[in-house]
């Protein structure tokens, strides 16, 4: 689960009303909103918030390392507040739904030395793809 608001408070990041509402929208599990979705949800809580403020705040959160950008198959970037919790993504190939998953094991250890081609591998990104239950039923 995301603890974005607590992390931002701990960093002493100035939480203006606009920044706070963006952070509140992003806080939670399985949150992977586009910037436009963040703006729409934030505007429902704080009608005067501008699209530019949302984009700027998202950019700051990414720069701080508190939110990560997730890009999938040419779709709009999505913003993931679980930047400090190791996880992978499960993505629906039809509707684009993204879920955080926490597989057991160490994917880095699964790469044999001869397949590393001399690289000093520091991180691994694994993406699971398929159809969500709603798309599979359609």
Image: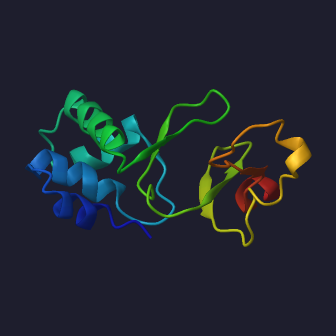
Q: How many marks?
A: 0
Could you say which quadrant of the image residue 58 lies in? top left
**Is residue 42 visible from the viewing direction of this image?**
yes
Q: 71 or 134: nearer the eye? A: 71
Q: At 73% across and 42% down in the image, what residue appears?
A: 94
List the single residue furthest toward the front.
Answer: 118
Q: At 50% across and 34% down in the image, what residue appears?
A: 77
Q: Is residue 46 above or below residue 6?
A: above
Q: Position of residue 112 (x, y in %)?
A: 88, 52
| Colour setting | rainbow
- Image quadrant where one finds the N terminus: bottom left
Q: Is residue 110 above or below residue 79?
A: below
**Is residue 138 visible from the viewing direction of this image?**
no
Q: Position of residue 55 (x, y in %)?
A: 29, 32
Q: Position of residue 105 (x, y in %)?
A: 75, 70
Q: At 51% across and 61% down in the image, what residue appears?
A: 30
Q: Position of residue 78 (x, y in %)?
A: 49, 41
Could you tell whether 92 is left or right of 67 in the image?
right
List the single residue furthest toward the right.
Answer: 114
Could you say which quadrant of the image residue 88 lies in? bottom right
Could you say which quadrant of the image residue 133 lies in? bottom right
Q: At 46% across and 56% down in the image, what residue appears?
A: 31
Q: 135 or 97: nearer the eye? A: 97
Could you tell whether 43 is left or right of 14 in the image?
right
Could you tell whether 128 is left or right of 111 in the image?
left
Q: 69 or 76: nearer the eye? A: 69
């Amino acid at each position: 689960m995301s603890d974005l608001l607590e992390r931002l408070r701990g960093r002493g990041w100035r939480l203006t009303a606009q920044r706070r509402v963006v952070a509140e929208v992003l806080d939670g599990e399985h949150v992977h909103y586009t910037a436009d979705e963040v703006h729409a949800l934030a505007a429902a809580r704080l009608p005067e918030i501008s699209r530019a403020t949302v984009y700027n705040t998202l950019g700051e959160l990414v720069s701080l390392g508190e939110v990560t950008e997730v890009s999938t198959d040419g779709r709009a970037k999505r913003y993931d507040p679980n930047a400090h919790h190791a996880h992978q993504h499960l993505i629906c190939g039809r509707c684009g739904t993204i879920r955080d998953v926490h597989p057991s094991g160490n994917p880095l250890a699964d790469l044999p030395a001869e397949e590393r081609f001399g690289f000093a591998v520091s991180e691994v990104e694994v993406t699971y793809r398929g159809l969500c239950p709603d798309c599979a039923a359609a």
